[in-house]
Image (spheres, rainbow, N blue to C red):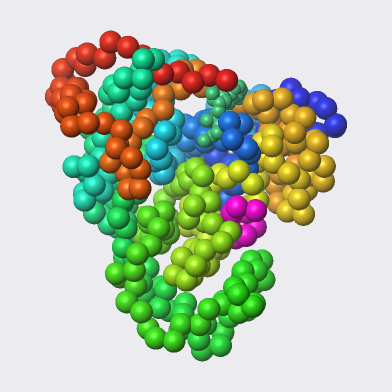
Amino acid sequence: MSEYTDNNISPLIGSKAFFQTFIMDDATSSTGSGGVQTAILGSFGQGKSTLMAWMAEYSRYMRVGSKESYISRLVHHGNILKYETSPTTVLWRCRDLDLWPVLIPANWNERIPDMPAKELALFVNENDIDDICFFCYDRDHKPIPVPNLPAIQTYTTADDLIGKIHEGSINIVLEPQKYRLSPRLCGLLAEARNEFDAGVKPDERKDDLVDIPKRGRGRPLKIKEPKDYSQHAIKSGCFWFDVTAATMAIFGNKPIMMIWDEADDFLSAASSDAHWWLININSELQRDFRKANISTVVSSHGFALLHDSAYKRATHRILLPGVKASKNTMVRYTQIISRLPKGHFIIEIQNKEFGVCKFGRIPYVIQSKIDGMKNSFRALDGDQKARIYAEYEKQWNGEQATVSKLPTVIEV
Ligand SMILES: Nc1ncnc2c1ncn2[C@@H]1O[C@H](COP(=O)(O)OP(=O)(O)O)[C@@H](O)[C@H]1O
Ligand SMILES: [Mg+2]
């Protein structure tokens, strides 16, 4: 997978570590190690989203055979006939101007013909479905439909979503634009509060891997009165805490990979009140992600933006050019990271070893804009939206779409 040989950084270790991030085995069987937590760090335009798209397509779990020996054979080009794998279910956090439309099977197969795409499903919250419109810009900056967009499915709550996701497929999920905490998260929040108020600090309970971040003069904020969190205004990204809690509760330990691009808006280093507690609750849950066969892939521009738990719990860290070496990395010199050619990255396995690996670009990336998102300007007028929807309706009814032009292609 890699031919970069500068600085004695091992491409073999790099490839092995990269395979480990997206090939899973089952932690509920005696040999399996389960979910893998990966953090991808890199500055703007270094390929974080591209890498995540590859990982979404590549991710598989072992049905027959051991993960380690399978990966060893992949790295050394050995015979892999006796191994059997199946596609891992992926949940992809959909964002504005995100490249997920290349993952739509017809689009992927056109670009990467030697690697069949996974199936793809698209979900929008029931309350948002009338407002939201996915579209692209063509070369003349004219709004056009996303090529081959699948019919949109709706969900109500995190539990409802987990019940509806397609197993073995890539599920693109737009988080609710107006999110209120679910009864499950409200319950977890009240519980965490009570334990804290009773004098048991969450970090004294199990291990000391994660430092509880300090607030104000060093003490977490004490809440005097119980609050009704169900009506609390909260960042819509916190929906993903709900999704992980729902996955743990009802998905039954089946292998799943959560892909959270630019995750620092909800796994943020600085947060207030309820959000701060939710991050800690998620970090507690994350202890058990491995055993629950939940893999997570989070990306951010740097260590300082992400909450400590998000990378301290990450067993695999991918460093793309533009990231500073820090006390959190095994790589000591920033220069080593910034000298990497585009498409290469350093990957380290926590406290163990690191290597180098590379990935390719995806040709003719399609980025989807989302009209009707909270806090963003309207990009479409009523007519444009109606015209785009009419195209989708035709497509979903099995008629040939009339897209005449290719979407804008942004190449560096
Ligand atoms: N491995 C690669 N080699 C060359 N170009 C790449 C590679 N990966 C991504 N690119 C290009 O770099 C640009 C930014 O990629 P993107 O994945 O959106 O980065 P990020 O998410 O870090 O901002 C895109 O134009 C993409 O085609
Ligand atoms: Mg990106």
| Image quadrant in which you'd find residue 357 | top right
Range shown magenta: 304-312
In this view, which residue lies farthest toward the right? 7
Residue that appears at 29% across and 69% down: 231
- Residue 216 highlighted magenta (yes or no): no
Q: Quadrant of the C terminus?
A: top right
Q: Split into 4 quadrants, where in the image is the N terminus?
A: top right
Camera-side residue: 310 or 403?
A: 403
Left or right: 155 in relation to 23: left
Q: Is residue 87 visible?
A: yes
- Outermost residue, bottom direction? 198
Residue 21 versus residue 111 in the image, above or below: below
Residue depicted at 31% across the width and 51% down the height = 176
Residue at (47, 36) in percent of width and height: 56
73 left or right of 166 in image = right
* Residue drawn at (32%, 58%) of the image: 179
Report the predominant secondary structure element of the magenta stretch: helix
Query: Residue 247 in the image: x percent, y percent?
Result: 39, 56
In this rendering, the answer to whether 88 lies above or below 313 is: above
- In this rendering, the answer to whether 45 lies above or below 348 is above
Left or right of 125: which side holds 315?
right
